[in-house]
Image: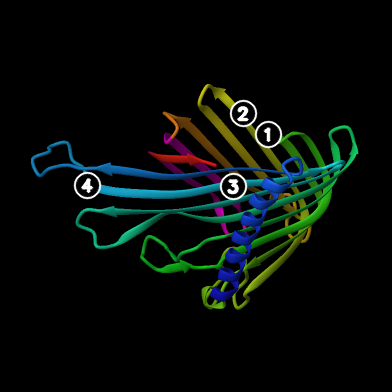
Amino acid sequence: MKKTLLSFVLLLAVIAVNAQEFTKDTTKLWSKKGNISLLFNQSAYNKQWLGGGTSNIAGNFSLNYDFNYKKGDVVWDNKFIAAYGLTKIKGDNKIAKTDDRLELNSLWGKKAKGDWYYSLFFNFKTQMDAGSDKNNLKISHLFSPAYFQFGPGILWKKSNNLSVNFSPSTAKLILVHEHFTEFGPSFGVLQGDSSRFEFGASVFVNYKFNVMTNVSIENRLNLYSNYLDNPQNVDIDYQMHLVMKINKYLSANVVLQTIYDDNSIQAVQVSEVFGIGVNYGF
């Protein structure tokens, strides 16, 4: 399974390089835009500090890359996201993971009328490293879980910064290594199984705007309803990325992700990363 993921990542790298080459040769067909950030956080206290607190240091890396194609009445938008973060608390030998995401979105559309397109989309999400619960028990690792969504639909695209895709017939596949389901379900996959297939409807919304000069917010919302099991329980995945540029290379970043998936856990999952660091756009 590790070899499969490594091959997949290698394929993504080849696609990204080719997209850049296409941009050079056929500027009117391909457009690309990417951002790399490396954020640092540190808190330090000496032994005389009476207010309390524990010294710690953290670092987060993120890559956000868009490579889009447009020719005539055909559009093909692609987004690749990779993020990884670690933190070390003084006095604790364990280095904890604070962020771990690997995601690819691909959306193809053929114009129907005006801002409307017939569409076909693909979404892949997984993680790169092992994850543990509060009892230090390993509950996930490389390519486990992995999520796939695929389906035809209708796309409303006002611009590269505002679009809504609706797919009434979406296939969804969840993969988890079988040792995580040996004693119970994991990430929606039933005990003893290593995969779960769902069929339902999905809505994907992308909205990016500038709050003011050098301050931008990108919002991404994915809703999914499984026809085969409690369709009234809608899965929600919302991501917000706020970038406040200080200058060409420095910025403050806030990344917020909120997930609700009752098959995994009947609660809202929230992840938030904030930091100031090196930022490079390309």
Quadrant for the N terminus in the image: bottom right
- Confirm whether the magenta stretch covers residue 131: no
Q: Earlier in the sequence, mark 2 or mark 4?
A: 4
* Amino acid type at image mark 2: Phe
Residue type (three-letter) at the residue carrying disc 3: Tyr
- Which label was assigned to residue 209? 2
Alpha carbons under labels 2 and 4: distance apart: 37 Å
Kindly indicate whether the residue at mark 3 contacts the one at mark 1 (C-beta within 8 angstroms). no
The residue labelled by disc 4 is 55
Q: Which residue is mark 1?
A: 161
Q: Is residue 74 left or right of residue 26?
A: right
Q: CA distance from mark 4 to mark 3?
A: 34 Å
Instruction: Give the image location of residue 14, x and y in percent.
Output: 62, 61
Which structural element holds mark 3? strand
Q: Which quadrant holds the C terminus?
A: top right
Upstream in sequence: badge 4 or badge 3: 4
Q: Which residue corresponds to mark 3?
A: 65
Mark 1 vs mark 4: in front: 1
Extent of the magenta region:
249-276
